[in-house]
Image (cartoon, grey):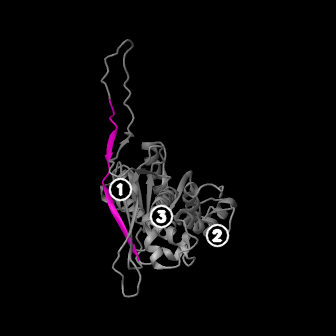
Amino acid sequence: MNMNQPVRKNYTELAVDLAAGRVTNFSAQESEDVLRKAFLAEIGVEKIETFAQYRRYKDIIFEIIEETLSPIINDQLEAQMGSFAEVRNIAWGDTIQFDMENPDLFEVAIIADGTGNLRRQRLDNGKLPMTMHTYGIKVYDEFYRFLAGRVRWAEVMNKVARSYTRKIAEEVSNALFNSYNAIDPMFKYTGTYDENQILRVCANVETLYGSAIIVGTKTALRPLKPTYVGDASKDGYNQLGYMGRFNGYDTVALTQSFKAGTYDFNLSETDLLVLPALSNKFVKIATEGTPIIHDNQNMNGDMSIEHYFIQKAGVAVSYTDKYGMIRLS
């Protein structure tokens, strides 16, 4: 990135790279300093020294953060679930409806020579609507502290973005894991580890869609160990904590998290999903507009000010009875 470009053309890219740990030309501290100076240059001051200055420039500060936070959230959603989920951003007020391809094949008839009187077949593709919900976070660490050099951008923005990403990932996982009873028996297995049963579920999903991947937390994926593996597979297992590829099927690890205010896991540590790996992806995620940031002007007893982060997002899952699930005991 050319740091001599106008500020508005580079601060978002730098912030996204900071959050993803992709900055190579600067150390983390140098990158923080460059970004902080870019913020101050946008405002038109050398430093913010008083609360009055923060109050005067906060709208510009919030605007910059709003523009920056949205691509960080989408970037993290894509990195975590992009193998089976399509992530899109839509404009404020837009509605979105996805076209979903029907996985069924056409029936082929045996006919006599010269006969053209066949039953016409049309496999309609489905429409997948999406309902948007508003998600919010409230924090009370003032943003002027970042400009003063006492709060690190990567820690603040990445934590906010990861919080949104975790919540949306929970919505996706709940939509998938909570429909076990509705899944056709051909596409599920419950019991102790049985390689043949696991491969049966994978093969059925693959037969229907043409491809399959296995999705779960690291702990849930850990039991998947083929009977015969070479040293390279063992090294890969030690590096990842699970097999990156199991009997020809790629595995995808979901990030685990605790339920708010508890140490209970959000995601099952024993359940595995078997999903199609399609170009028209199985799960749809959309964020609407850019995040909104505003503060509460009523100051608390500790002289801090509450800041609200609000982001609209939606999750939709297609073919809820035609994917696989494995529950290991």
* Front-most of residues 224 and 37: 37
Labelled pair 2, 1 in contact (Cβ < 8 Å): no
Closer to the chain start, of discs 1 and 3, is 3
CB within 8 Å, label 1 to label 3: no
Which residue is pictured at 36% across the width and 82% down the height? 299
Q: Which residues are magenta?
A: 122-139
Q: Quadrant of the N terminus?
A: bottom right
Relative to 130, is 214 on the left or the right? Answer: right
* Circle number at residue 28: 2
Disc 2 residue type (three-letter):
Ala
Quarter of the image for residue 139 reads bottom left
| Residue bearing the label numbered 1 | 314
| SS type, badge 2 | helix
Which residue appears farthest toward the bottom when viewing the image? 301
- Can residue 269 be seen in the rendering of this structure? no
Residue type indicated by callout 3 = Ile
Q: Position of residue 180 (x, y in %)?
A: 34, 59
In the image, residue 217 above or below residue 124: below
Of circles 2 and 1, the one toward us is: 2
Using the numbered discs, state the Cα–Cα distance from disc 2 to disc 3 in whole angstroms: 19 Å
Asked if residue 62 can be seen in this view, the reply is yes
Residue 225 quadrant: bottom right
Q: What is the crowding at mark 2: few (fewer than 14 residues within 10 Å), some, or many (at least 20)?
A: some
- Find residue 65 and name its label: 3
Disc nearer the start of the sequence (2/3):
2
Q: Secondary structure at mark 3?
A: helix
Q: Tell me which amino acid carries mark 1.
A: Gly
